[in-house]
Amino acid sequence: MNRLTCSVLHVARFVLEARTALSIGSGGADGVYDHPIVRDANGLPSIPGTSLAGVLRHLWANDHKNDPSSANRLFGYQQGNQGEASHLEVAACALQDSQGQPVEGLLLQAADRSRLERDWLLSAAVKTREDPLFRDRVRLNHRGVAVKTGKFDRGLLAAGHRFSGELRLWTETREDLDWRALLGLLADPRLRLGGATRAGMGAMKLISLHTGCFNLRDPVDIEAFQRLASGLGSTAGLSPCDPASLPPSGVAARTLMIELVPRDFWRIGQGNESLGGSEKTPDLLPKLEPIVTWSNGRAVAGTRFALVPGSSVKGSLAHRTAFHWNALNDKFVDDPGVDVTTWDKSEHCPGVREIFGYAKDHDTASGPKPTATGQAGHLLIDDAHIEITEQDRCQRVQAMIHNSIDRFTGGVRNRMLFTEELLYKCPIPLRITLLPGINKAEATAQRALARAIRDLCEGRLALGAGVTKGHGSFTGTPDERTRDWLKAQEEN
């Protein structure tokens, strides 16, 4: 298909919502934070067209492995002196204001600039440029403790923000199967944008979709195309399309849904804002994040929600999966020749390496040793947010007083009293997406993962801080599909 012979233009305008926090990096540090998010000329967070196009191409290539040239034909390519322009045009996605209208163009006039101040959603988004939301991250070693110089942070945009975008595809005919399949990727659960997608961020949800088709050799279609407004928020002249009617991907991902019910107290992360009403702010606080919620197409200013990062669940599951993989393969720490400092690392656990992925550069027992390539994991764990209402605070938020103990005498250290704020029996909705493509040779990998999930559901795997004090123990209730999958792994 030659681009010069393509006269039919397919147009789609859509609205994407960040189901979890979004972290599309700008590509450099700002001197304070390691990974600031990308912004447009108005200082508002943005989704570059290249980011969306790259993810769509990756998903398309995975779905069409039997036709390697398919991605080149649709998205274009450049190989030496050979190449072809992309048939797909992807516009940068613009942030919506609290009324559901995208902010497009450079706001230079005083009236336009005042829009950023009047609208609470845009005002809050601009303020995060100087005082950004961010996640503290730390790399863990095989003992589950922080690696030296492994501390970093990542800027983010709170979950719930919406973006308006546009896709255009040039084809030779009106009925084009590639176009329908491409639109289906917008509603695919694998669609994740930005960084840390394997740590819970970047999950997107397709809210609305409007499409149109114009044959630019037909005078009637030319006139209809000329009447089409250029704004991303304008849908006049386009037909609504139900996201549920889009064709499913040829590569089905498995979604595991589990409701974790704490046995008593838990706390994950370290925040800076208290949920309780005590006079003195506790020293140790749960991590809180704001969420934008929508009602009838209007954004609602919500309170901060208690956060359970996907990375906190992923790390625990990875270590327990390594344990079960070694046990299933008769590898134990007391066996002769086993190095206890590396026995649960990815190079010794192909199952963990296959499911959870690995970095291009990683530490070995002899020091840093670069690998040829890295690989993203097949496991996606979404961030979970727990709403704590005013009525719940009296029962769900509790402060616990601790004394620091002298490790030599076993007595209380002078003036070392501190307080910890904990959440009491607040359920956590856990959503895990298991991507296809795991090597069949690693049949024990999924069984080890299933056993790790079962440990979590049966209270044998704790999450968060204070696990040595009895905190973070849960009982889990999987949904029917998850129960069937867990049972099938034990029977394999």
Image (spheres, rainbow, N blue to C red):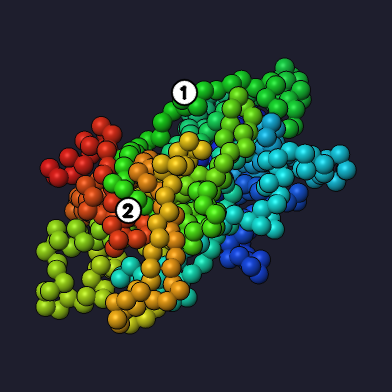
Residue 267, image x and y in percent?
Answer: 40, 54
The three-letter code of the residue at mark 1 reads Ser
The residue to which callout 1 is attached is: 245
Residue extending furthest toward the top:
220
From this viewpoint, is residue 387 visible? no
Quarter location, residue 25 = bottom right
Left or right, 358 with respect to 237, comes to left
**Residue 483, quarter of the rendered image:** top left
Quarter of the picture containing the C terminus is top left
Mark 1 vs mark 2: give the one in front. 2
Amino acid carrying label 2: it is Gly
* Disc 2: which residue: 472
The answer to whether 407 is drawn above or below residue 19 in the figure is below
Q: Residue at x 14, y 67 (%)?
A: 331
- For the point 50% across and 48% down, the residue is 276
Residue under the image location 71 percent in, 49 percent down: 126
Judge the density around disc 2: few (<14), some (14-19), many (≥20) Cα neighbours within 10 Å.
Answer: many
**First-in-chain label (1 vs 2):** 1
- At x 67%, y 47%, the residue is 125
Secondary structure type for disc 1: helix
Dot 1 alpha-carbon crowd within 10 angstroms: few under 14, some 14 to 19, many 20 or more:
few
The image quarter in which residue 425 lies:
top left
Is disc 1 in contact with disc 2, using a CB cutoff of under 8 Å?
no
Q: Secondary structure at mark 2?
A: loop
Counting from the top left corner in percent of width and height, residue 415 is at: 45, 74
What is the CA distance from the residue labelled 1 to the residue labelled 2? Answer: 41 Å
Q: Tell whether 167 sits left or right of 223.
A: left
